[in-house]
Image (cartoon, coloured by chain):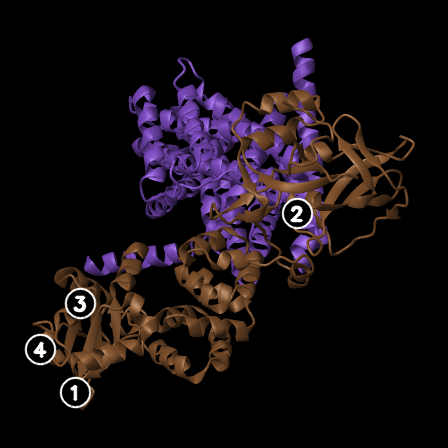
Amino acid sequence: MLELSGAGAFSMADNLLYFTELLSMPVLDLKGRRIGRAKDAALVPREHAARIDRFLVGGGDTWLTVRFDQIRSITLDRGIQLSDEQLLPYHDDEYMLRIGRDLLDQQIIDVTGRKVVRVTDVTMGIHHDGQRDILTVLEVDIGVRSIFRRLFQGVLPWRWVRRIEHRIPPNSIRWEFANVVEPDPLRRLRLNISYEKLEDMHPADLADIVEDLAPAEREAIFDSIDSEAAADALTEVEDPKMQASILESLEPEKAADIVEEMAPDEAADILSEMQEESSGEILDEMDSEPKIDVQELLEFEEDTAGGLMNTEYVVLHDNATVTDAMAALKGNEELLESLNTLFLIDEEERLTAAIPLARLFLARGDGRLKELASETLIQVTVDETQDRVTEFFDKYNLLTLPVVDDEGKLAGVITADDIISILRQK
Amino acid sequence: MRKTLERFRYHILVFLAVLGPGFITAMVDNDSGGIYTYSAAGAKYGYLPLWTLLPITVVLIITQEMCSRMGAVTGKGLSDLIREEFGLRITFLLMALLVLANFTNVMAEFAGVASSLEIFGISRYISVPLAAIGVWLLVVKGNYTSVEKVFLFASVIYVTYIISGILVKPDWKSAAINSVRPILMLDSGYIYMLIGMVGTTIAPWMQFYLQSAVVEKGITAKDYAASRLEVTVGCIMTNVIAFFIIVACAGAIWSVAPRDINDASEAALGLKPFGQYAVLLFSAGLLNASIFAASILPLSTAYSVCEGLGFEAGVNRRMSEAPVFYFLYTSLIVVGAGVVLIPGFPLVRMILLSQVANGVLLPFILIFMVILINKRELMGDWVNPRWFNLASWATVVIMIGLTLALVGITIRGGAS
């Protein structure tokens, strides 16, 4: 089972080698003399995403660099045999992702498992391409099996370690689904690290991941994913203080892009948590239209209806028809996902009726919207307290509650998800 | 009546407003181990141990400050940092030691529960299992954060020691002289007590707990100044209480006849000026302190270990998601409480022993902390000032020296 020769050149990973086993493997020159031991191995992500490109060998005082094409064979019994002895001394190369230094014991993101994990070991495959043995990173190991291996490698013979660890269930993440976290933007560029994979995640999962990371790493992720994904994830981050400190850590321009993508009420909540100076800087960078929405909301006290509401709603004139409503919805497609009520206003912009969206399906195209309205119009004023608003939602089983100003003009809406957040925080 | 009630409410609000990780840590610092260690020191050696409090306070402030600074600057827990900078083997070794030392601490907390209620004739076979189940449920299923405030407020009971310390009319002159005049004796009992006093005040687990709490609270380098103040005030408070516990016990017990403390009724003599209420006050304080610490300690231990070794952790995770975490948390409570139920288990002696275990482990944790906090790539401009390093290394050397001395004396004592 533990066949460890270089034969079988056709399958991708005929043999496995763990990074802990590679460490301190002897490196032999053409005549079979030992020139040192393996101290680390590195990927050069710009060249290849998974191939071990460089081996760092420590002999006397200095470390030498061995390129992957200078190697003839890698076996657990005999170590690393070179095919070329022209080795360069190692000097720090910023294009290298060093497994031992940069990956081992550090935190990475498990994209499929949607969580932050700590790397205990790295599983590599050895395959022979006709001329040489090539190592490819296959999996990142976490969990008890790899902990056992790390603790006992070098203490017990490797065969024993492999035999015993076989009884422990494995826990690994495929390399393609492991996302390295690197706070330094320059290094991120050089190492070809991107967070594109994170953009496809559900925002709530991404938020959970971000909450598990340190501030610098959080900032790195928000800085490099696109503004829309960032806005969605930021909305899902639970702690308002953390939301504020993430925005504060970003460049005002980037922060403004993110805030523009957020629902105005969420944006206003976060900005109100920040120091005025920083929130001012962000507002300055914003486009005028979302900026006005957010600024209006910032005027209200946090725990009143005005502070809870958002300004994303669809409103029509009093005597509009069902066809008009359809047209209006087509123009507001970005709202559709969460929209469940339409509002009607009169000439003076005063709220007159609320139409449950579902009723549109049963109505004729030329029918008047007014006739579809809910029997009683339930609304609150902007200065209503948070507790009363919650009570209203409970009492009338609402999904959406319109908020009006002193003159009865529609100022915004409160939606059930806002209420759920409030109740969760209590 | 209404007015006083309102004013009372106001004071509670102000009190709760200043609460932060530093303050909570300071209060938990005086757990059952703390109360018994200080009481025993005062009862047996009188005012003599008082001189240790000044240096202990300084070192406590320094270590706590380092932890909260590391938490604020890196946003990572102490075991995270140890793992990232020193690798798995060292982390594993340290975590094993931490689990061992913290296990004795958990045991001490349940021994505190047992001894506080045994005065009233409540058998430990009832009180300890109930407390263990209660703590487990409170943390895993209940709402610990709201109960935490109750614990904290109940800690006000320590004020009784300050009052008692004054009412017993201690020999203030002697107390004052001994507060600044160091006395070292190569006597195993005395050295044992010294290690215990340092260990109970600067417990290793507190460093892990405090740093995680700072990270959890989202304190960053920018708003760190307030945190530093809070930590400092908390540390001073801890030791003011310690001072009065020792003085009260010296005045009430040692001045009559120096003796060892073997159970709660003897330790309660430190509150003698309260007459018939002394026992009640003592056990109420001890019970609160024990359960408070028992709620934090196993949890903090399980967190530190899981973070360091890379297992999922947290009470908001399900048991199937974080099996190692729950296993560790539950076994610390079950075994810690279980040991106390062994017939003939000497409660107070074991409580004192647990604090000595803390003191022996402390220098090792401190070494790693000092190395970490001096790494510029981690801390940037927030690395340690030189005198912090000097004080920390001095503590390391002294604690290792004391431990070696204790081992040496014990071996020689055993041989003769």
Q: Residues within 10 Å of mark 3 (few under 14, many from 20)?
A: few
Task: Describe the element under mark 3 as helix, strand or loop.
Answer: helix
Three-letter code, disc 3: Ala
- State the residue position of label 3: A358
Q: Is residue A308 visible?
A: yes
**First of labels 2, 3 by sequence position:** 2
Chain B: drawing colour: purple
- Distance between the alpha carbons at the discs numbered 3 and 1: 22 Å
Viewer-side residue, B320 vs A303? B320
Chain A: drawing colour: brown
Three-letter code, disc 2: Ala
- State the residue position of label 2: A50
Residue at (66, 62) in percent of width and height: A189
Quarter-wise, where is residue A195 in the image? bottom right
- State the residue position of label 4: A371
Viewer-side residue, A145 vs B190? A145
Q: Are marks 3 and 4 in contact (CB under 8 Å)?
A: no
Image quarter (top left, top right, bottom left or bottom right) of the C terminus of chain A? bottom left
Asked if residue B177 lies left or right of residue B43, the reply is right
Residue at (46, 64) in percent of width and height: A229
- Distance between the alpha carbons at the discs numbered 2 and 3: 52 Å
Asked if residue A287 lies left or right of residue A27, the reply is left
Of badges 3 and 1, nearer the viewer stands 3
Q: In the rendering, which numbered label is found on residue A346? A: 1
The percent position of residue B357, horizontal first and vertical second, equals 57, 28
Q: Is disc 3 in the same subunit as disc 1?
A: yes
Image quarter (top left, top right, bottom left or bottom right) of the N terminus of chain A? top right
